[in-house]
Image: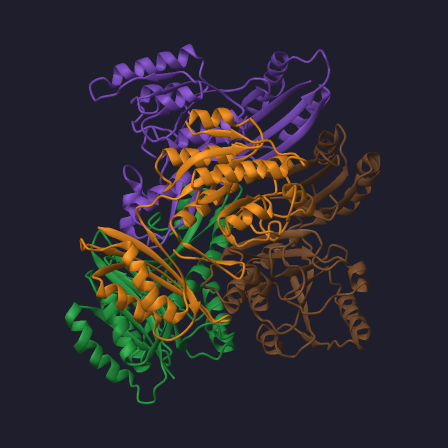
Chain colours: A orange, B green, C brown, D purple
Amino acid sequence: MNKITLLIYCKDQSGIIASVTNFIAERKGNIVYIDQHVDREQNIFFMRLESEFFTESFSTDDFKIKFKEVLADRFNMKWRIYSSEAKPKMALFVSKYDHCLYDLLGRYNSGELNLEIPFIVSNHNDLKPIAESFQIPFYHISVTKDTKEEAEDKQLALLEKHQINFIVLARYMQIVSEKIINKYPNKIINIHHSFLPAFVGAKPYHSAFKRGVKIIGATSHYVTEELDAGPIIEQDVARVTHTHSIQDLIAKGRDLEKIVLANAVKLHTNRKVMVYNNKTVIFS
Amino acid sequence: MNKITLLIYCKDQSGIIASVTNFIAERKGNIVYIDQHVDREQNIFFMRLESEFFTESFSTDDFKIKFKEVLADRFNMKWRIYSSEAKPKMALFVSKYDHCLYDLLGRYNSGELNLEIPFIVSNHNDLKPIAESFQIPFYHISVTKDTKEEAEDKQLALLEKHQINFIVLARYMQIVSEKIINKYPNKIINIHHSFLPAFVGAKPYHSAFKRGVKIIGATSHYVTEELDAGPIIEQDVARVTHTHSIQDLIAKGRDLEKIVLANAVKLHTNRKVMVYNNKTVIFS
Amino acid sequence: MNKITLLIYCKDQSGIIASVTNFIAERKGNIVYIDQHVDREQNIFFMRLESEFFTESFSTDDFKIKFKEVLADRFNMKWRIYSSEAKPKMALFVSKYDHCLYDLLGRYNSGELNLEIPFIVSNHNDLKPIAESFQIPFYHISVTKDTKEEAEDKQLALLEKHQINFIVLARYMQIVSEKIINKYPNKIINIHHSFLPAFVGAKPYHSAFKRGVKIIGATSHYVTEELDAGPIIEQDVARVTHTHSIQDLIAKGRDLEKIVLANAVKLHTNRKVMVYNNKTVIFS
Amino acid sequence: MNKITLLIYCKDQSGIIASVTNFIAERKGNIVYIDQHVDREQNIFFMRLESEFFTESFSTDDFKIKFKEVLADRFNMKWRIYSSEAKPKMALFVSKYDHCLYDLLGRYNSGELNLEIPFIVSNHNDLKPIAESFQIPFYHISVTKDTKEEAEDKQLALLEKHQINFIVLARYMQIVSEKIINKYPNKIINIHHSFLPAFVGAKPYHSAFKRGVKIIGATSHYVTEELDAGPIIEQDVARVTHTHSIQDLIAKGRDLEKIVLANAVKLHTNRKVMVYNNKTVIFS
């Protein structure tokens, strides 16, 4: 059995759904998931579809070629087709905070995540023992003002060598530059420790404390050139009170960060996220 | 323009989605919403679809006839088709508590609800002034052990006279009997003031207080013969602490009840609920 | 029986709690609630205390005089003492949106709120019928760029005449000027339809939609001269998805606004809020 | 500097707070936290107080002796005094599920938990590698119907040898018998994977799925002889929909279980929990 996931994005127009479902039916596909969304303001159509094919002759590559010829060109679609066999390869970037790292590796070890982690990279050596206890290669690439370009070249070499599909910044305390972002557009997931767009930038828990908010949050988003302004994938919040010190906010926030980042990673690897206009469509 | 909403429910089998979307396309329909769900344990397929038809010759009645012939019989579907023009008629049953009544009537007045309220009925006279201030007919039908059957006959006569489509029990403190339930299967919405299945029956806030729970809830569900055991439409919860008295739980619960009931009413009237196996599928 | 609520705020120092509880004990008071908070960064001490006095000779006025002499001056306290008999008088300012008005009046009618509403004032006539149906005096004071000062003078005259203790802006779509703010410092409660400090100012739901947030919020705060920047009393949030239009956000937001505003009003009238450094301490 | 935490529980009566705060003041103590609660139904008074003592001559033991003589006997208090120096010793009981184990050990390693973990015990060997990677002694004590008594004797010997203060059942899939419960009254924390009192006993996610609830939960509670009926310490919930399979509920539930259990452990070790009438008072 072959299973594919199809993501489509084009100008809204009549007949797309019927055409696509017909195309699948003609190839004896069994649609097991279909969902669509129309942004009425922008007049854009989005679709996510999963289909199983039981015929021996089925080939994902042939399907792609025909899909392009018959449908994608006709409707001027942007589209992606994923085979369910391929596990995406994720690079983990960390610094000194260990909570998101522990959380992701714990889930990875339990088989909860549909991905591979070829390596962990860090600008510090502190988390090396954790990487080792989970038996994942750990690379230390220090980053200073002067060595940043060189460091990013090393990172890019690692990413290429390991055929990395997407990057997760698990509280990586460095700004990733344009060069890497452009190689991984909407493929770098960051976790920001505030309820964006509130408290962009450094020390958001300090700002939240100062402002006296009654709820704190965490936000995972794709990295774009503008700091903390990329498409939001997932957010969550927790109540706080005047009794919470900054340290308490940080501790409570860690639990938010872990879950929000893990959920974003799952949504990404399950091909449930589509990006447009700096926003996301998240299929359920 | 004609707009219809189609709800389908049948054994899962290949080709349903393609057949239905084709059927719509052949009639020049523009599908503006499609969502589907498969219960893999029970092998049941569910679909909700909205389509617009711009041809002058379109007739919902013809569509229904053809749909039955061409598709419904072939796939052995249970199905319903609603025209978006028809506003469902809701009967409101209340007793003495006014919070859900105020809330629903406030929303109704603001145009938030897609429905009509031909009348309010109560076993007490207390809330008559509220009905009057919103200029909705109010019927007082007292219910005692001895008069229950007679009272329900009066209620049924009112329901029939006003061609009521569904009933909302807005903290109506009487058990509705089989006779009415059978006339309105999955069309009577109740709000229960607990997080079902915890605390079935009377005085759930008292039970919650006694058990020392840290979260209370409210549940809206369709009424079935077994008390508080019908298909759940919507639930919500709120945190409580040891400092909350039973009165505090009741006050906090009122806010839950209002929102949970209002959401259930909206889901129902927007044709987003399907019922099977005493559970609901809630389309988004 | 006399019951008082005491709120204290001063530099943190040894012996405050013992001195205050002793002072109460000497007057045969029975402390039924005590809670305290220390802001360790600022070294400020806060206390809220409720005490019952059963002796016939007890006089709140005498208590206040003695309290000042014996304790307040010694510890350089800022303090307030409220008798539980006095119901605070609230003025309601509204414009055209009715949801917060319906909600507050529904609660008021049910006896849920410990306050009096001498009047409702609006810059439009739209909500007059609601005020009338609840039998509360309604004043229409139109506000234009040219008449703003005159209008505020009329408002101030009303506030004074009715001995108003605090003001609630229930989606009042005008900026209240310094003149009124200075007469009611930390006594004007606004409801802002966003999760502050995100989306300050006009049309926050539009901004939230554009940014693609996954959670929206509402914030009630005391009005200060800087727009939407006063001390936050209460916040709440709700999940949204890409399927929600701006209109959906507005509708979902209404439910948040109602509850957040009602909770803020309850906290304020139950003397549970203390303000310092543009933040609040909210006693439970 | 010495710091103590004092927990008191007695019949409500006049003068307790003043007497206790005076007692502290006479010993030059600086109260840094005081909170109290009265259960008005049962007429029981609870207090939690933290005080710092800077005099060299201060002795916690002397304080205890005097406190008993002067206050505890007079008011017929149940009371406990903890020195902040002593870190409680926690035994971890696990079976095969690793998520709560990973979570607690990750927090432990990060210094987030104020406790020591002398050992982990399990009826299976599966999680031994995790214990080893965190360098915590792991004991395998298999439990079968026939060997249960013997196994519990071995467990008790371990508990005694390591002077364990409290036990955490981190998804330990065995029922702990009376013998151990009686040695650790209100000192065994369990995590149950449902929103108690709904879905007591085995396979709660299966029951939740069958009932079609829209929200699932997790509950941490002290273990008593009646299954899943002990005093609730902490609960949390998450929304689910018809699209979630039982496996999805289990996966979502894991995140709830981790956080609810971790929070319960923190509340317990920070001496913030008092138990009475099979309920808890949780100080903030």
In the image, residue B21 sits, relative to residue B234, either above or below, namely below
Give the side of residue B274 with respect to residue B263, left or right: left
The percent position of residue D282, horizontal first and vertical second, equals: 52, 35
Task: Let me know if residue D63 appears in the view.
Answer: yes
Identify the image quadrant of the C terminus of chain D.
top right
Give the side of residue D223 with respect to residue B177, left or right: right
Give the side of residue A235 with respect to residue B43, left or right: right
Identify the image quadrant of the N terminus of chain D.
top right
**Front residue of D147 and C52:** D147
Could you tell me which residue is drawn at 73 percent across and 76 percent down?
C141
Task: Let me know if residue D43 appears in the view.
Answer: no
- Considering every residue shown, the one lying at the far bottom of the view is B56
Quadrant in the picture for residue A57: bottom left
The percent position of residue C263, horizontal first and vertical second, equals: 59, 55
The percent position of residue B173, horizontal first and vertical second, equals: 37, 62
Could you tell me which residue is drawn at 22 percent across and 55 percent down?
A58
**Front residue of A41 and D19:** A41
**Front residue of C282 and B36:** B36
Q: How many marks?
A: 0
Quadrant in the picture for residue B168: bottom left
Quadrant in the picture for residue A251: top right
In the image, residue C252 sits, relative to residue D33, either above or below, namely below
The percent position of residue D174, horizontal first and vertical second, equals: 29, 27
